[in-house]
């Protein structure tokens, strides 16, 4: 019997579920409402134009929580960073999360498709800057000095996510796609599994429950990210070591 081809190129997509055990609420879980608002109601350019104070408060609250000393990466973030450093092939990481827990876990080249909470953007000159404090209507751009134009560096509903072309190119040449902690309800990220499968990749989902796109995956590992991701990483590293030994 021919040996299965060894995995050489992995693309990982993470969502809010991977950070849930670190204490950051997901969007669609029971705790996913904020002051009676769904995230989609505050995460739009229209909401920002209508009520900038409300939208700033939404992101200021999330930023303060992220910077709380009690918030840290969990075993799933750490396992992905380990895979990126030890796997003898490519491991590309895309996240829908705006937190920095992958970076804190040691992951290089984290591609934040929906932006980053710890950055601000000037709507006038486009300058992106580090942002660890509150933003408000009075905030001034450090680059162009314009007042009242600062927004969180977040991709809102109706805006185009970052790194899409790169993601599609990498998914087309990947032989394994892994989605962790994402409900599969927000496109284009929810379509990644289709792109990967169309190019012949194997696809594995890790989630607390089956996502909206679960049927498209070859395998669904149901459980918490902090339990399941380290086990999967261990298996992938063992498989790679066995393939190298067999070469
Ligand atoms: P969701 O909140 O939609 O989904 C989180 C998923 O994680 C759910 O399927 C949960 O069952 C699962 N989950 C929860 N806890 C988990 C755990 N401990 N281990 C494993 N899985 C767990 O979050 P996303 O899919 O990331 O966009 O949402 C996608 C986008 O919708 C977000 O990036 C955001 C949001 O509105 C923007 O803000 C543009």
Image (tube, grey):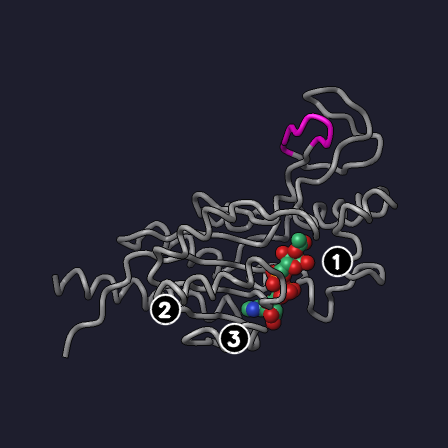
Q: Residues within 10 Å of mark 1 (few under 14, many from 20)?
A: some
Q: Secondary structure at mark 1?
A: helix
Q: Nearer the viewer, residue 165 or 90?
A: 165
Q: Height in image: 116 above or below 149?
A: below
In the figure, residue 240 lies in which quadrant? bottom left
Residue 222 relative to residue 30: left or right: left
Q: Is residue 154 above or below residue 26?
A: above
- Residue at (57%, 60%) from the top-left corner? 15
Q: Which residue is mark 1?
A: 39
* Residue 12 x %, y %: 44, 58
Query: Disc number at residue 202?
Result: 2
Was residue 178 drawn as part of the magenta stretch in this picture?
no
Q: Which label is found at residue 214?
A: 3
* CA neighbours of label 3 inside 10 A, class few (<14), some (14 to 19), many (20+): many
- Compared to residue 183, the image places residue 152 above or below, namely above
- Residue located 57% across and 57% down the image: 188
Q: Does the closest atom of ligand 1 sit within 8 Å of the Cβ of label 1?
A: yes
Is disc 3 placed on a helix, strand or loop?
A: helix
Can you give x and y, in whole percent of width and height, for residue 9 in the image?
Answer: 32, 56
- For the point 58% across and 67% down, which residue is it? 184
Which residue corresponds to the image point at 45% horizontal and 56% vertical from the top-left? Answer: 78
- Looking at marks 3 and 2 on the same chain, the residue that comes earlier in the sequence is marked by 2
Q: Alpha-carbon distance for marks 1 and 3?
A: 23 Å
Specify whether tag 3 is near ligand 1 (CB below 8 Å). Answer: no
Q: Quadrant of the N terminus?
A: bottom left
Frontmost of labels 1 and 2 is 2
Q: Which residue reaches farthest left?
A: 247
* Residue 124 lies within the magenta run: yes
């Amino acid at each position: 019997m021919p040996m299965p081809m060894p995995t050489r190129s992995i693309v990982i997509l993470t969502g809010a579920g991977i950070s849930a055990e670190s204490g950051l609420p997901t969007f669609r879980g029971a705790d996913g409402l904020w002051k009676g608002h769904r995230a989609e109601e505050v995460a739009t350019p229209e909401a920002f134009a209508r009520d900038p104070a409300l939208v700033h408060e939404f992101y200021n609250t999330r930023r303060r929580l992220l910077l709380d000393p009690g918030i840290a990466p969990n075993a799933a973030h750490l396992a992905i960073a380990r895979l990126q450093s030890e796997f003898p092939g490519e491991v590309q990481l895309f996240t829908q999360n705006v937190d920095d827990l992958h970076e804190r876990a040691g992951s290089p080249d984290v591609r934040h498709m929906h932006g980053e909470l710890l950055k601000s953007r000037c709507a006038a000159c486009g300058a992106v800057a580090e942002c660890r404090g509150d933003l408000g209507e009075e905030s001034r751009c450090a680059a162009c000095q314009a007042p009242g134009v600062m927004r969180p560096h977040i991709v809102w509903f109706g805006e185009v996510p970052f790194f899409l072309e790169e993601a599609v190119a990498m998914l087309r040449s990947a032989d394994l796609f892994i989605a962790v902690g994402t409900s599969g309800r927000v496109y284009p990220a929810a379509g990644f599994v289709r792109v990967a499968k169309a190019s012949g990749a194997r696809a594995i989902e890790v989630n607390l429950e089956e996502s909206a796109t679960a049927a498209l995956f070859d395998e669904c590992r149901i459980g918490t990210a902090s339990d399941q991701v380290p086990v999967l990483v261990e298996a992938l590293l063992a498989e790679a070591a066995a393939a190298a030994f067999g070469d």
